[in-house]
Image (cartoon, coloured by chain):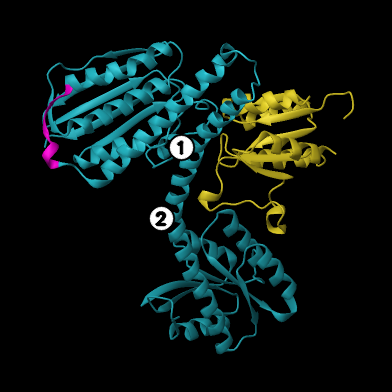
Chain colours: A cyan, B yellow
Amino acid sequence: METLSILVVDDEAGIRSGVKRILSRHTVSFPFMDDDYAFDCREAATGEEALALIDADPPDILLLDNKLPGISGMEVLEIIQQRKLDIIVAMITSYASLEIAVRATDDGAWDFIPKPFTPAELKASIDLITKQFFLRRITRKMKEEGKKIRYQFLSVLSHELKSPLNALEGYLHMMKDRELGEGLKDYDQVLDRSIQRIKGMRSLIMDLLDFTKIRLEKKEDKIEKVNLRERANLALSTITPLAIQRNISVRYSGEDRVYYNADPSDLDIILNNLLSNAVKYNREGGSVDLSVSGKGEEIEIVVRDTGIGMNEEEISQLFKEFVRIRNTRTRGIAGSGLGLSIVSKIAELYGGHIQVKSKPDEGSEFRVILPSS
Amino acid sequence: MSDKKLTILLADDDPDQIFLVRHHLERWGYTVIAVESREEAERYLESACPDLAILDLMMEEEDSGFILSYRIKQRHPEIPVIISTAVAAETGISFDINSPGSKSWIKADHYLEKGFRMEHLKIVIEKLLT
């Protein structure tokens, strides 16, 4: 049995106690619900009192009379809409003010209960409202869990994989139709761009493969004592060509002898992702600093950049799968939106975590902390 | 077509898409104003008015194209708007801008899924401009 909280707002004490009495003994069950619903009623005699109760502890359902001594029911409804509170509101109105009821439903009230009502009529309304509550909750759950991820996954795949294909197809058609001339030289730019797009697509596919790999789990048989300085050097040499292209200096400032028990390819993924982000989201002539150090029982991998940085809101989005920070500064930077969620998943696999500090236009610092295994 | 060249606003955050579409539009005799974001497009629209707009759906936001289209239609309801995107059917989102439900909120005249053939674009533009 689940209990839904109801707030009854009416200036007539008789109505409030009547509703309370009827609903205290009422339960709702529908065949498609796992659980029956019972009700717990609170009351308020004015709109002001109702808002104070809503602030303290928002109810699931609000039964709201329009004609109240202070602010009207419609005004309470408006405030609830403004604050985007997730409350199902039913207006209690006399037949004479059906017009208000209609307006209220336009303004976001879910239903109205005409006054006077019999106990059976009230129960019938509450049954419908409960059904609505249940459906709303299920929908929200589906949206939050499955659909959102599906949507993001597919929109990234569509956008990031199809866009390069569309570009390549367009360029090939141009060449086929000799749009830019007869000589191969006329197509240098087109060929350069095509190669760029293929590279982007390859890195997305690599990310997806990494992602499915860590979706499995840590491979115990691959764990070995890894020299982190060696992995760092490898990652630095991987990123150097891109850094040179973008005129960004990359250096190592950590310790020379740090060891960690891990699958070396997991560490490579962490280092490569952090470094490539630091270079990609940097500014012309900027710098990137990588350091790895042992701190008692744990090791720390820190990557600092002098890049475009992020604001608080962007930081909060950062580790979500397939979420890419889209703004005018990141426009034209290719990415899958998977890199950081891969890094943080690997860190978690080893019992560690990732921290980020960032300021717009100043740069970011990513710190991966792994406890000794 | 009259002697005066018609202007098309092309908004897309994919430089390759801009390059390709611009190339064809110019070959067909249009003047092209290309921008890479909704923000840039809005700046352009403050002082100028194209004869037609081709908008990518996903730019800064997932729905930049819709926002932009809405703004254009608010000020210049007569300007035809084409929305194009690579994101579509796979995500379960399909836009049928001819259904009354979508028409109430998608303010666009035509919807093109990216990967469209240039000849197709040409036909759509010519139809919208007559």
Residue A126 versus residue A148: which sits nearer the camera? Answer: A148
Q: Give the side of residue A345 with respect to residue A84, left or right.
A: left
Q: Amino acid at mark 2?
A: Glu
Crowding near pointer 2: few (<14 within 10 Å), some, many (20+)?
few
What residue sits 65% from the left and 18% below the top? A180
Residue A133 versus residue A7: which sits nearer the camera? Answer: A133
What is the x, y in percent for residue B123?
A: 75, 38
What is the x, y in percent for residue A251?
A: 29, 13
What residue sits 71% from the left and 81% below the top? A95
Which of the 4 image quadrants contains residue A227?
A: top left
Q: Give the side of residue A134 with respect to residue A170, left or right.
A: left
Give the chain of mark 2: A
Label placed on residue B75: none
Secondary structure type for disc 2: helix
Q: Cα distance, mark 1 to mark 2?
A: 21 Å
Total number of numbered labels? 2
Which of the 4 image quadrants contains residue A57?
A: bottom left
What is the x, y in percent for residue A41?
A: 46, 76
Label placed on residue A145: 2
Whether residue A96 is visible: yes
What is the x, y in percent for residue B66?
A: 65, 43
Which image quarter holds the C terminus of chain A?
top left
Label placed on residue A313: 1
Give the chain of mark 1: A
Residue A192 versus residue B95: which sits nearer the camera? Answer: A192
Q: Are marks 1 and 2 in contact (CB under 8 Å)?
A: no
Q: Which region shows up in magenta?
A: A220-228
Position of residue A183 relative to residue A329, above or below, is above
Q: Which label's residue is closer to the chain start, 1 or 2?
A: 2
Q: Give the side of residue A291 with respect to residue A262, left or right.
A: right
* Eye-nearest disc, 1 or 2: 2
